[in-house]
Amino acid sequence: MKIVACIKQVPDSAAKVVFEDGRVSWGDAPLVINPWDEYSVEAALQAKETHGGTVTVISLGGENDKEAIKHALAMGADDAILISDPALRGLDTQSIARVLATAIQKVGEVDLAFFGRQAIDSDSGVTASQTARVLGWPALTLAAVVSVEGNSINVERSIEEGRQSVSANLPAVVSLVKDFGEPRYPSFMGIRKAARAEVPTWSLSDLGMEAPASVISWPEVMNPPSREVVCEMITGDSPEAIASTLVEKILSEKVI
Amino acid sequence: MDFSLTEEHQMTERMVQNFALKEIQPIIKEYDRKQEPIPFAINRMGELGILGICFPIRYGGQGMDFISLGLACENLEAVDTSLRVAMSVHVGLCALTLLQWGTEEQKNKYLIPLASGIKLGCGVFTEPGMGSDVSSMVTSAKKDGNSYIINGEKMWISLASKADLALVTVRTSKNEKKSSNGLTTFIVELDSPGITRGDIHGKLGVRAGSTGWINFQDVRVPVENRIGQEGEGFKITMSAFDHGRYTVAAGAAGIIRSSMEASVKYAKVRTSFGKPLSEHQLIKEKIARMSQDYDISRLLYLRAGWLKNKGIRNTLETSFAKKYATEASFQAVNDAIQIHGAYGYSDEYDLERFMRNARGAMIYEGSSEIQILIQSGYALGERKDKPLRCELPAYDPEFWQS
């Protein structure tokens, strides 16, 4: 079975992301694998362990953006491809999906492409579905349980109301949620392999495509409005008097 | 001179840190209060390969180097000392000493299950009546045919009640001119008849760590379990301490780092006299000292790890690292508590636990006073490293990873 896990490199979740001088900045916070994509790699590795085959990791980014890829290799992925091209900067999800779909086709004979449910930086959550659409494959999103039998895949989707069972024929795109189960840590053997791995870089011309045109642009990005908190100390002659003043304040401010 | 860590080292740090933060940090306070080890912690460290991190794959290990061992210890103790203590006794005192002094048969029989995390090891030296003065131990072993019979009591033993195997040093002769020449070391299976053991509670710190006593009553140990030769026990024990102290030093750097990170975070958000604490010079001084001490401690332990990788004796350098880092960690957490004020004094924050934990490391594995004797001995020319019959092998990636 040929399995692909698509991953994204994002600022660490502890980073303070702000909009400064016309740019989104996360200071000197490290870049890491998108936490949701760790589930995608875990699902890919489990599929490989059950059915055999290989796991290839695909990521888009700058030439030095290999942190996420190395993490996935250290978890146990067999190989990785970094798609890097100056023309990819600022593309929308639809364009990214076209690039990923082309890369998946170039890898060839892929049975399953796993994604995390969304990226923690842009939070759009549609790349998996859009990639499936470009490939013409079924998109089984929000998967908590994945099982493959022969040429078909069954997925339990974790949705607000409960679980939904869906099935489709391979090849298919699957996006994962936390309910899938904790992703493994990198192993020491994996760490050594990842540290030594030469990750091939594909440009758009390697993929035989022009830069897709974005249909969504970012005309404006802004910081969330800062909350103004005023602290007022309530004083009184007795606890009862303080409580009574507090109750009046709460009622007049319509807190309850 | 290259001070950079390799990509393998950096990934090792992150992996161990993620494990400790994700699985231990959320529950450590609860177990520290209960004075109980986290039940799954050591097994999990075994599953993840951390307990065998620096051993050759052929002996069940993970094939990483000795610097990786130090980095793992720093990141474990940055969350809780009990995790690093497990490394100190299982890896440092027991398994690394076996790698250094054991025969091929002993390594195959005992190092493989230890390094692969199937069995847990500890180091058994201290007694109720002796600690720093190793050569005055009285627990004895008498040769009887193809066995030795051990009698006596050992105390303050980390993992005493949890370990499967113990590296034990005892007295085999009282007639030597130098009493240290009368010691011999064994690897002992702790389920052997005649062994009773238990835990000690009421410690100031490392309350989620297991510390206990082991009593030997006519415990028969086969002669093939003797490590090295009869009379080599003192040298073997000193090798064990070189390894153990390295892990203690690295771990102490983790306490300094955590104290500093907590202080920086708090000092930026807490205000006093109308400005953040971080803008007060007296607070800056404390934070600067933590930051400097972290750097010094880390450099000192990484140098010891580098020497270990090269196969060069490092008793003095490890002693520098152990004494400096443990004392600096106590100072750092004391300052961090001062910065946090009353909050630092309560167990709402991790600092009071770190402070209790940091105190022990100035006592165990060679007290600060013993480190001073070692260091002055070298400086005054009274002490020189003589070649040992068995040295810790230099880290050779090919041998380690094949």
Image (spheres, rainbow, N blue to C red):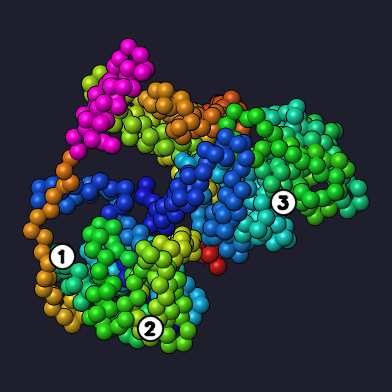
- Please give the range of residues in magenta: A227-256
Q: Residue at x 40, y 81 (%)?
A: A167
Say if A224 sits above or below A78 in the image: above
* Residue A143 painted magenta: no
In primary-sequence order, the first of circles 1 and 2 is: 1
- Mark 3 lies on residue: B164
| Inter-mark Cα distance, 1 to 3 | 57 Å
x%, y% of residue A165? 42, 75
* Chain where mark 3 sits: B
Does residue B70 appear left or right of residue B217 in this picture? left
x%, y% of residue B394? 54, 54
Q: Secondary structure at mark 1?
A: loop
- Mark 1 lies on residue: A89
Q: Secondary structure at mark 3?
A: loop
Q: Is residue A215 visible?
A: yes
Does residue B38 appear left or right of residue A155 in this picture? right
The kind of residue tagged 1 is: Arg
* Chain where mark 1 sits: A
Q: Residues within 10 Å of mark 2 (few under 14, many from 20)?
A: some
The kind of residue tagged 3 is: Asp
View extreme (right): residue:
B145
Pointer 1 with pointer 3, Cβ within 8 A:
no
* Residue A238 painted magenta: yes
The kind of residue tagged 2 is: Ala
Q: Is residue B236 visible?
A: no
Q: Residue at x 32, y 66 (%)?
A: A117
